[in-house]
Amino acid sequence: NNNNNNNSTIIVSPATISLKLLLLWIYWDAGSGKLFDPLGGWSSTADPLPALDTYARHTTAARYVYAVLGPQGLRLLTPAVVWIELLAVPGALLASGVWGSQSGTWLAIGLICSLHVGIAICLNNSALLSLTACVPWTIFLPIGWPPDGTAATAATSTHSPTIQVNLQNIMATGCLTAMMLGSIWIDALSASCDQSVRHIWSTLLHNRWNVFVGAEEYVTWEIAPGQLANGAVVDVWSRSLVVNWAMPGSGAPSTSTARPGRWRSFPYLAGLEGEEGEALWGYLCDEWNREHAGLPDQNLIKYNFFMLQADVLPNMAFSATRKRLIHTHNCFKGNNAVDDDNRDDGSDGAETIVNATSSSKSDSHEKPPNTATQTTNDSRDGDEL
C-alpha cells in the first residue's frame, strides 16, 4: 500500500487472512455479547451498577483506577469498552489494508492493547492471557514500517497484493477452512451430546469469546478448613496454617492467589461422584500430606470445602459474607459427602468432626450460592470443623 509516497509491504497468505478473520470474530463475539446483554450491564444506564464498576475492585491497581475515575467515570467508560472491541479490528483492516494509514493502524492497535493492559492490571489472574492477546495485533503491521516511521527502501511494491497458488497454500487453506466449518458446526448445528468436554473435538472447536457479558453481581471464593493429626486447624485450599474467612483483597488468600491457573476450575467439578469424586477431593489430602511428609502429626485427617459469596454494592462496598458447604471429606474413610443429618455446632472450636456448623444448615447445598443467606464471622477459624 502507498501512503504519502512511502510504500510498505503487507504479507498476504491463508495464514494472515485467517488470523485477521479470527481476530474479527473474537472481538465481534466479545463486543456483541456485551452490546446485546439482556440486562444492559455494559451500558451507561446499567442498573444498579455498570460492569466496570463491578470488575474494577479486586487488585490494588483496580482500586486506584476506581479512586481516580469514581463511580460516574466508570459508568461512562463502560460502553467505551464495547465499542473498542467492536470497531478495533474493522478499523485496523481499513487503515492497514485500504487506506494505508500508519496512524490509523497504530490507533486501533493502541486502543485494543490499552484495553488488554487495563484488564491485566485490574483483574486477578488475567495478566498472561491479556498481554498475550496483544501479540496477534502485530499482523496488521506491514514489514515496511521501521521504527522511525519511514518506509523501508526495499519495500517499494505499490500493486495490489496477490496470493501465490501452490500446494502449501492449498493445504493450509483446506485445514483452516475445516477448522472454521467445524467451529460453526459445534456451536450452531451439533447435538448437545457432541458438546461434552469428554470429546476432544468439543474442546478444539468451541470458539466462543462472549465472556464477561454481564455485570458481576457477586464475588465468590473458596476456603477449606481441615483438621490435622495433632488437632490443629489449617486451610487446606490456600495451603495455610491459618484459616482466614475474610474476603480476598483484604489480605486473605484466594483461588487467584493461592491456586491460580487450572485450579480455578476445581470448584466446578464438585458434582463428581464415585471414584472420580474420591480422586478429586482426595487429591487435596494427598497433596497436603505429601508436602508435609515426615511430619506425622501434621497429616491431614479431614476437611470441609466451603464456597463463600458476597454481593457487589455501590462505592466499592460488599454485602455480608454468605457461606455454602460444598463437600465434607475424610481422608481415611469412604464416607465423604455433605450430610444434613450429621452436623455439629462446633462453635467453640473444640469439635474435631468435619461437619458444617448449625449456622450453615440453611445454606449448604439446598440453595445455589446466590440465594444463600447466612453470614459468616471473619474472626472464626476452627468453628467450621
Image (spheres, rainbow, N blue to C red):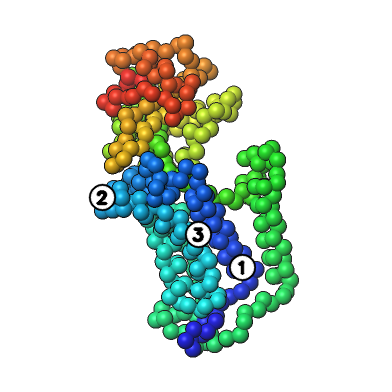
Nearer the camera: disc 1 or disc 3: 3
Mark sitting on residue 168: none
Q: Position of residue 345 (x, y in %)?
A: 35, 13
Q: Which residue is mark 2?
A: 67
> Image point 53% across, 66% down: which residue?
90
Is the C-beta separation of discs 1 and 2 under 8 Å?
A: no
In the image, what residue occupies the spot 49% across and 84% down? 3
Determine which residue is flagged by label 1.
Answer: 17
User: Which label belongs to residue 86?
Assistant: 3
Left/right of residue 376 with respect to residue 101 in the rendered view = left
SS of the residue under disc 1: helix
CA gap between label 1 and label 2 equals 42 Å
Q: Residue 365 or 283: which is nearer the viewer?
A: 365
Q: Could one spot residue 101 in this view of the protein? A: yes
Q: Amino acid at mark 3?
A: Leu
Q: What crowding class fits label 3: few (fewer than 14 Cα within 10 Å), some (14-19), or many (20 or more)?
A: many
